[in-house]
Amino acid sequence: MISFATTYYKYCSPARIDVLRNMEIRYTQPVCFNDPFETAPAAKNGIHALPYTQRQKAYDELRSSKKIDLDQKRGRQRIAFANERALLSLRKFAAHEIGVLSLSKRWDNQLMWASYACDHKGFVLGFFPYFSVPFGDALLLTEPQEVKYQESRPEIDLLPYVRNINQASFEFNLIDAISKYQSEIFYTKSSMWKHEEEVRLLCTFGDAHHRKIDVEPYPIYLRAIHEHELASIIVGINSSDELAEELQQISKQRKISYYRAFKDAATYSIGLWDAHTTEQKMKAFGDKTHIGYRHSRKNSSSGLGFGTTC
């Protein structure tokens, strides 16, 4: 039985071997995530709290105008508009200016192997729980925070952070609002994603501790990985021989634990062999397709006849 101390895992497609080649990993803007509800809490006492007959007109007005009629006579609608406009500013900043490293508490989630590791053709990186984060001239150790899952979007009250409300404009204290509602903005997701058991590490792009690649529609930000942060490499069941060999070489060079995944003989579970056992199996059978209990895929990209693009 192979046991791990507390470790967090990153599911990677085969192309992401560049993470290990360059020792850099992407901190992704939430606007690039596959969930459109990222960094999207609802505004407490926002437009959705208005009477039903007023909501659509209010949403249309909010979208079509950069200025808001904050006439005191408008009462609840005035409060709703102030909250919604502040929320738009907050979401724009959070979605574009914050980087997120998403990890999981599990290495054996088959849905994630399929989705993020390209139908088990990729690999999983194991990270120790403490990451080095730049702070001035020093490196501070920090631990990722767990994502909480719930049925409804959290509601946040931004009115206390709105200043100088008048007929034409207002000021919004963005930084204090994000500090207050960090959990609701960055660490809350729909319960539909709870199988991922996600933890997250955040950074901002305002410092110089990243490498920026200008691409469309959004730039890519890479931060250095320190060797002491890497715990393990797990090679997928359907990984190519070439990928497995390079990952094993990297594991030896960087002194990272190496494992090869295989299908359990009688259950829907994934098993692991360590590097020594993997080499023994290779010597015994002379073919990586016999290391585990997977089928040969020489004649089809999928056992069900579906093509793959990964």
Image (tube, grey):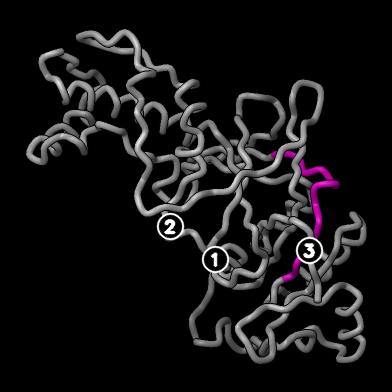
Secondary structure type for disc 3? loop
Q: How would you rate the neighbour count of disc 3 (Cα within 10 Å): few for under 14, some for 14-19, many for 20 or more?
A: few
Cα gap from disc 3 to disc 1, whole angstroms:
23 Å
Coordinates of residue 307 in the picture (x, y in percent): 51, 78
Q: Going by the image, does 295 lie left or right of 93?
A: right
Residue annotated with mark 3: 4
Contact between labelled residues 1 and 3, with CB atoms less than 8 Å apart: no
Q: The magenta stretch spans which residues? A: 223-235
Of discs 2 and 1, which sits in the foreground? 2
Q: Nearer the viewer, residue 28 or 3?
A: 3
Q: Going by the image, does 60 lie left or right of 110?
A: left
Q: Nearer the viewer, residue 273 or 224?
A: 273
Q: Of callouts 2 and 3, which one flags the residue occurring earlier in the amino acid sequence?
A: 3
Q: Going by the image, does 287 lie left or right of 283?
A: left
Cα gap from disc 2 to disc 1, whole angstroms:
18 Å
Q: Of callouts 2 and 1, which one flags the residue occurring earlier in the amino acid sequence?
A: 1
Residue annotated with mark 2: 191
**Residue at image x 80%, y 83%?**
288
